[in-house]
Image (tube, rainbow, N blue to C red):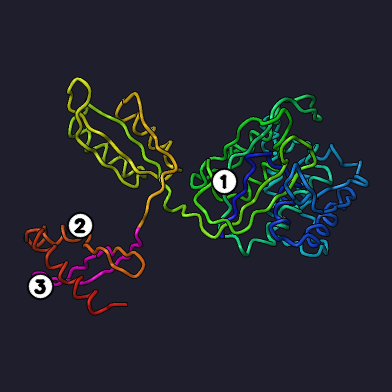
């Protein structure tokens, strides 16, 4: 089961995440009660979760009303003291609150604090929590995490689509600042804390608009970065199962909603990017070196095709098949090694892939036993191909001084006999 968080239309915030996850099926009473309980040490809040209509879209709205705040600490609590208060929740008997949820909340707030420290040029210990330190933000973070954990048994992966951050300016405790808020933008870099950089996730993307208003809050961005396992530019191939909406409090001439899609499969393993460039100035040795280097740097496949270029010059087309997360890296390798002035990139290309199985079989050659690995291709239950691994038969041919074609013929006879006697 894959959840797709889609903030492309109206951005993202803590209460929008809560609304969307409750709309998706999280227990609203459990979420509401936990939010009010964990926020108590920071200030009393009253939470309501209800269905509303936003510009024609029925969505779930989570409203956090601050009744009383702890004025001794509110807006002036340092990050270490703030985290200690979060840690102290472990010693309280709060229903449905787990240590794992507390640790995730600490990680969310640390993302925000690290970004605040970078933006304002302070150490982490000097960071004061303002908006995020208030009771309603504590409630938002724990409410989102509670809803996430309530659904987590059904989640295999969370995919994040680009965030619309809005535009214009916003008034904060630091004065009037541009939108997106500097802290929000820094959080979305995804590199703001040791251990957070993960190339397998890709890069979180954002874009301005579509209105002159703040659409992505630091809290919403930090939760998004914490929840998502992968970031994509476009929605993947999918079969939507459930579509849920959580809304914000602002009113626009379009639905101010965060969409979350539950899908049973996305075929992401079939998604590749194709990188191409034309070369007419490299020798055969240089092309061979480049071929091996690209594979070593993570390319899924590389091909070099002779072509005729302008003015009838002979040249080569270099084509690379890459996982989307490695495109930028492989493009940089290609620029550096070839000096080419232009590279074409075809992103989000979907390919059909037959199921692959590997079968090892032993073969006696010259009084010695060798293991040959066979690659079996299937579509459903039908075998469409079977071939021995080249390196295995090459090793035997060299060691035994036997033509490669003879070893391949013996190997193919073996795999046909094996498959014939092991149908099903």
- The residue under the point 89% across, 46% down is 66
Residue bearing mark 3? 367
Residue bearing mark 2? 390
Pair 2/3: label in front: 2
Residue 370 sits in quarter: bottom left
Rendered location of residue 274, percent (x, y): 37, 40
Residue 349 sits in quarter: top left
Left or right: residue 368 versus residue 94 is left
Determine the secondary structure under disc 1.
Answer: loop
Q: Residues within 10 Å of mark 1 (few under 14, many from 20)?
A: few
The quarter of the picture where the C terminus appears is bottom left
Residue bearing mark 1? 195
- In the rendered view, would you say 94 is above or below 367? above
Rendered location of residue 281, percent (x, y): 22, 25
Q: Magenta segment: does it hold 230?
A: no
User: What segment carries the magenta color?
Assistant: 354-376
């Amino acid at each position: 089961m894959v959840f797709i968080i889609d903030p492309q239309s109206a951005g993202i915030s803590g209460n929008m995440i809560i609304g969307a996850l409750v709309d998706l099926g999280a227990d609203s009473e459990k979420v509401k009660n936990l939010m009010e309980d964990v926020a108590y040490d920071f200030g009393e809040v009253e939470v309501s979760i209800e269905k509303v209509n936003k510009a024609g879209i029925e969505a779930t709205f989570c409203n956090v009303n601050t009744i009383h705040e702890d004025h001794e600490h509110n807006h002036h609590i340092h990050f270490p003291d703030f985290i200690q208060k979060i840690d102290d929740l472990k010693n309280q008997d709060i229903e449905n609150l787990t240590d794992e949820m507390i640790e995730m909340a600490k990680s969310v707030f640390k993302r925000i604090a690290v970004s605040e420290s970078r933006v304002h040029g302070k150490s982490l210990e000097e960071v004061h929590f303002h908006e995020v330190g208030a009771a309603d933000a504590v409630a938002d973070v724990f409410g989102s995490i509670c809803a996430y954990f309530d659904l987590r048994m059904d989640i295999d992966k969370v995919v994040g689509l680009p965030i619309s951050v809005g535009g214009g300016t916003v008034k904060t405790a630091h004065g009037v600042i541009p939108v997106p808020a500097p802290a929000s933008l820094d959080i979305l870099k995804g590199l703001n804390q040791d251990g957070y950089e993960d190339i397998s996730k890709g890069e979180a993307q954002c874009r301005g608009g579509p209105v002159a208003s703040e659409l992505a809050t630091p809290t919403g961005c930090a939760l998004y970065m914490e929840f998502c396992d992968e970031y994509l530019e476009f929605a993947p191939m999918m079969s939507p199962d459930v579509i849920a909406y959580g809304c914000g409090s602002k009113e626009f001439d379009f639905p101010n909603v965060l969409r979350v899609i539950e899908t049973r499969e996305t075929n992401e393993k079939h998604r590749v990017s194709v990188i191409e460039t034309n070369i007419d100035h490299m020798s055969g040795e240089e092309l061979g070196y480049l071929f091996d280097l690209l594979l070593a740097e993570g390319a899924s496949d590389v091909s070099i095709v002779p072509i005729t270029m302008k003015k009838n010059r002979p040249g080569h087309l270099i084509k690379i098949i890459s996982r989307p997360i490695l495109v930028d890296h492989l493009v940089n390798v290609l620029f550096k090694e070839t000096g080419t002035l232009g590279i074409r990139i075809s992103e989000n290309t979907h390919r059909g892939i037959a199921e692959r199985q590997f079968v090892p079989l032993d073969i006696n050659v010259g009084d010695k036993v060798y293991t040959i690995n066979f690659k079996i291709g299937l579509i459903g239950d039908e075998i469409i191909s079977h071939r021995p691994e080249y390196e295995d038969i090459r090793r035997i041919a060299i060691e035994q001084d036997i033509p490669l074609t003879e070893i391949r013929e013996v190997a193919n006879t073996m795999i046909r006999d094996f498959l014939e006697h092991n149908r099903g």
